Amino acid sequence: MATERTLSIIKPDATRRNVTGKIIDKLESAGLRVIAQKRVRWSQAYAEAFYAVHKERPFFNDLVAFMTSGPVVMQVLEGDDAVATNRKVMGATNPADAEAGTIRADFAESIEANSVHGSDSAENAAAEIAQCFSEGEIVG
Ligand code: CMP
């Protein structure tokens, strides 16, 4: 298996409920290492740029409003097949469909307040990591 990096974001519903440590424990227990991390409050412009790929979707404005409603924790995860491993631990986008034991099954409140984001491909992971972190902030 190839060592990969992926971008993970702990969303405002999870920071609000003080469960960032419990979420990071699930990621680490799956073999992923946190090699960069910062807690920030996104501006509207930052959220719109990050989710630009969804700008034509009907949920875009609500998504931006939600992602700017409180702090997020952005992190770079490294490990074997990190993109797929992270998505497996996260569970399905809609928590109603998420497998038992996944982050979204245990913590998400709704399809919007679904506790975590994870890159969906190695290519998008590289782009999202570059958008959120400078090289010097990533310490493997
Ligand atoms: P995320 O992986 O962060 O990528 C886009 C987000 O849009 C997604 O997780 C969901 O939280 C959010 N979203 C809100 N409504 C929908 C929807 N109807 N379908 C898909 N994603 C949605």
Image (cartoon, rainbow, N blue to C red):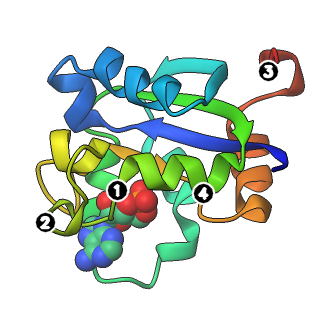
**Other residues around mark 3 within 10 Å, as few (<14) / some (14–19) / many (≥20):** some
**Residue at the spot of label 1:** 91
Residues at marks 4 and 1, CA–CA distance in whole angstroms:
11 Å
Is the C-beta of the residue carrying label 2 under 8 Å from the nearest atom of ligand 1? no
- Is 85 left or right of 92, judged from the image as shown? right
In the image, residue 77 lies at what x, y percent? 65, 33
Q: Earlier in the sequence, mark 4 or mark 2?
A: 4
Q: Amino acid at mark 4?
A: Ala
Disc 4 and disc 3: Cα gap in Å?
20 Å
From the image, which quarter does the C terminus lie in?
top right
x and y, in percent, of residue 50 in the image = 57, 55
Q: Are marks 2 and 3 in contact (CB under 8 Å)?
A: no
| Among the two numbered marks 4 and 1 on one chain, the one whose residue lies closer to the N terminus | 4
Left or right of residue 33: residue 133: right
Label 4 sits on residue: 84
> Which of the four quarters of the rendered structure image does ligand 1 lie in?
bottom left
Q: Nearer the viewer, mark 4 or mark 3?
A: 4
Residue drawn 61% across the image and 30% down it: 32
Whichever of labels 2 and 1 marks the residue nearer the N terminus, that label is: 1
Q: Is residue 73 above or below residue 49?
A: above
Q: Earlier in the sequence, mark 1 or mark 3?
A: 1
Cβ atoms under marks 4 and 2 closer than 8 Å = no
